Amino acid sequence: MLRIYDDGLAMLEMLAVYIGAIERRDGDLARQLRRAAASVVLNIAEGSYARGGNRKALYSVALGSAKETKACLDVAKALRYIAAIDESIAAKLNVICAVLYRLTR
């Protein structure tokens, strides 16, 4: 299993507070954030055991979901549902995206 799997799980744990805060203001955005963040971890896990082109496709979906997770946080910040995005979450997302990007090329 890739190390970024553990990074993804850590990111999910850190996002729990944000999801709760966003949910109080915008249930749809909170659900989208929850699904996108979970998709990152789930697709990394599935890709780790896939073969050939399926592996690349699953990592590509995980990358898209990581970007969507970041976008959900950006939207929540822009709408003032949250004050700021924790730097450790942003750092984990950056690492995850960088590794997934390399794996899909």
Image (tube, helix red, strand yellow):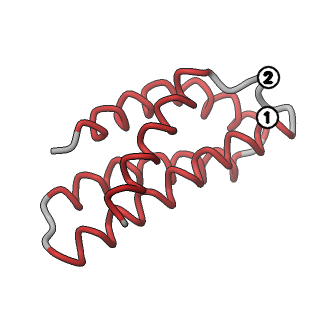
Residue at image point 51% right, 61% down: 64
In the displayed orientation, state which residue is furthest to the right. 79
Identify the disc placed on residue 83: 2
Question: Where does label 1 land, which residue?
Answer: 77
- Tell me if residue 60 comes above or below residue 7 in the rendering: below
Q: Which is nearer the eye, 104 or 40?
A: 104
Residue at image point 59% right, 54% down: 68
Does dot 2 land on a helix, a strand or a loop? loop
Q: Is residue 72 left or right of residue 83?
A: left
Residue at image point 58% right, 23% down: 17
Q: Is residue 24 left or right of residue 45?
A: right
Can residue 35 be spotted in the picture? no
**How many marks can you see?**
2
Q: Amino acid at mark 1?
A: Lys
Q: Is residue 78 left or right of residue 93?
A: right
Quadrant where the N terminus is found in the figure: top left
* Disc 2 to disc 1: CB gap under 8 Å: yes
Q: Which is nearer the eye, 29 or 85?
A: 85
Percent coordinates x, y for residue 102 in the rendering: 37, 55
- Tell me if residue 102 comes above or below residue 54 in the rendering: above
Q: Residues within 10 Å of mark 1 (few under 14, many from 20)?
A: some
Q: Amino acid at mark 2?
A: Ala
Q: Which is nearer the eye, 105 or 79?
A: 105
Q: Which of the two labelled residues, at mark 2 and mark 1, occupies the earlier sequence position?
A: 1
Q: Is residue 47 left or right of residue 84?
A: left
Res 61 → quadrant: bottom left
Percent coordinates x, y for residue 48 in the rendering: 18, 56
Quadrant where the C terminus is found in the figure: bottom left
Gap in angstroms between the C-alphas marked 2 and 1: 6 Å
Residue at image point 37% right, 38% down: 8
Identify the disc placed on residue 5: none
